[in-house]
Every structure is written in structure tokens, then in C-alpha cells.
Amino acid sequence: MTPVELVLVYVALPLLTISSVLYLLVVYRGPTISDRVLSADVFFYTFTLFFGIVGLLLGSPVMVICTVVLVLWAYALDIYVAKYLERGELGD
């Protein structure tokens, strides 16, 4: 393994895993809905980064492309929650 791969495997991936667990804890027990939404958003982006790193390490272009779908889901979550907090409804 190259030094970059070693750093990714032994430093970046464990830190991303720990931070993802902490983000999910805030999503579950967050004090306000805004904190929960922000934490879910950051969780999606962290998970996307994790998924992209694993895809690069495995040499799988499909896994790297799937990160785009995860980012779009996170963006859609932001739009829907912002609309709900602004108007109180999700229709129209």
C-alpha cells in the first residue's frame, strides 16, 4: 500500500466513522429541528466522503459515482426541510 492509502485507511476512515456516529446521535437527540437537519446534512456529506474514499481504495468507479446520488439526496433534504420550516407544509 502507498502512504496515501495507509493514511486513508488508518486515519481518515476511522475518523469519518466516529464523526458519523456522533452526527447520528445529534440527529436522534438534537435539541431543535434545525440542529437535527444540519446534523443529518453533515452526516450525508460525511457518509458520501466515506463512500468515495472506499470506492477509490477499491478502484470501483461505480461506488464513486454513487456519491453523487447521496449528495443529491442531502440537497433534497435541505430543500424540503427549509420549505417546511418556512411555510409549514410540503405541498405545491
Image: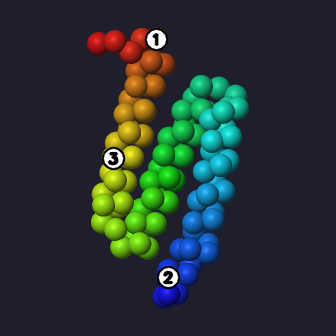
N-terminal-most mark, 2 or 1? 2
Which residue bears the numbered disc 3?
A: 69
Q: Residue 4 has which mark?
A: 2
Judged from the image, the secondary structure of the residue bearing numbered disc 1 is loop
N-terminal-most mark, 3 or 1? 3
Residue at horizontal 66%, vertical 33%? 28
Residue at horizontal 50%, vertical 41%? 41
Q: Disc 3 or disc 1, which is closer to the eye?
A: 3
28 to the left or right of 52? right
In which quadrant of the rendered view does residue 89 lie?
Answer: top left
Judged from the image, the secondary structure of the residue bearing numbered disc 3 is helix
Whole-percent x, y for residue 6 in the image: 55, 81
Q: Residue 2 has which mark?
A: none
Which residue bears the numbered disc 1?
A: 88
71 to the left or right of 88? left
Reply above or below: 20 against 14.
above
- The three-letter code of the residue at mark 3 reads Val
Residue at horizontal 63%, vertical 63%? 15
80 to the left or right of 24? left
Report, in whole angstroms, how far the alpha carbon at label 2 lies from the one at label 1: 47 Å
